[in-house]
Amino acid sequence: MIYCISDIHGEYELFCRLLDKVRFGGGDTLFVLGDMIDKGTQSLRLARAVLSMPDAAVIAGNHEYDLVKIYRARADEYGDAEAAADTLRAYFPGEEKLMDVGLAERLAALPYFLRTKDMLCVHAGVPLSADGGILPPERASREQLVYDRVFKEPSVRPKDSPCVVFGHTPTRYIGGRDGVLLYPRSSVPPRSVRDLVKAHIDTGVTLGGVLGIFRADDCRAFYVHS
């Protein structure tokens, strides 16, 4: 099974409970669509756990991107990666010992999109052509991929493309509740991700304590609550 999750924001315990709930295990794949860190109290513990999972593929969100920009700027300023990593520790009170150059470099090396036959996974959004088609994400800036606030709008429905799975904006601001939002290609209930235009999966865990995960194989969503 293929699972997608986004915007976990340091909620390590909820993340573990959610994987237990779906019985994530051998043969399953997890796509993590950015924003593992910040807001929650176990950001670095979560990031280290996710990055150590052999069956997880991770992309950067705006929070990782912003942290990496600080790290790179300090490394250039000091000429010392260790000193640059040390400056990051102040952003994670209680977890200072978990930040080091190795973790900073792994965050810096994260890609900004993932693509399969049936899905294009980004953190926030992708650029569209004048006729509504998706432009290649390779041509998008990192800022577009992690900060976009237009793609989330229900009226934006890409044409002739794989399903775009994304997070970044809590779905409560679009649908009025903390749950995964699916955009089917037709009036027929979707049976797999191939039947979707978009899947919006940021369930706003830092707002309402709900963490969700989307299963691409059958378009089901699962949730745990704080």
Image (cartoon, helix red, strand yellow):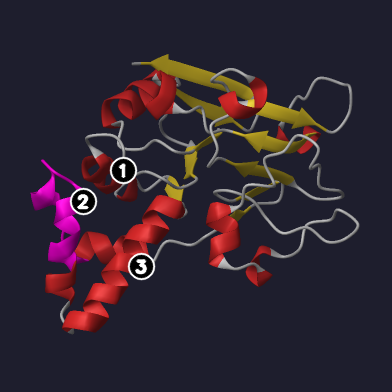
User: Which of the 4 quarters of the picture holds residue 141?
Assistant: bottom right
Start-end of magenta stretch: 85-101
User: Which of the 4 quarters of the picture holds residue 138?
Assistant: bottom right
- What is the distance, in whole Å, between disc 2 and disc 1 at their CAs? 8 Å
Crowding at label 1, few (<14), some or many (≥20) Cα neighbours within 10 Å? many
Q: Amino acid at mark 2?
A: Tyr
Relative image position of residue 188 (x, y in whole percent): 87, 21
Q: Which residue is mark 1?
A: 38
Q: Which residue is mark 3?
A: 69
Relative image position of residue 13 (x, y in whole percent): 27, 26
Q: Is residue 111 left or right of residue 197?
A: left
Query: Under tag 1, what secondary structure?
Result: loop
- What is the distance, in whole Å, between disc 2 and disc 3 at their CAs? 14 Å
- What is the distance, in whole Å, between disc 3 and disc 1 at their CAs? 15 Å
Q: Is residue 91 magenta?
A: yes
- Residue in the image at 30% along x and 37% along y: 10
Contact between marks 2 and 1 (CB within 8 A): the answer is yes
Q: Is residue 184 magenta?
A: no
Q: Which residue is mark 2?
A: 91
Query: Under tag 3, what secondary structure?
Result: helix
Query: Under tag 2, what secondary structure?
Result: helix
Q: Amino acid at mark 1?
A: Asp
- Residue in the image at 62% along x and 19% along y: 176
Crowding at label 2, few (<14), some or many (≥20) Cα neighbours within 10 Å? few
Please say whether residue 108 is visible from this viewpoint.
yes
User: Which of the 4 quarters of the picture holds residue 131?
Assistant: bottom right
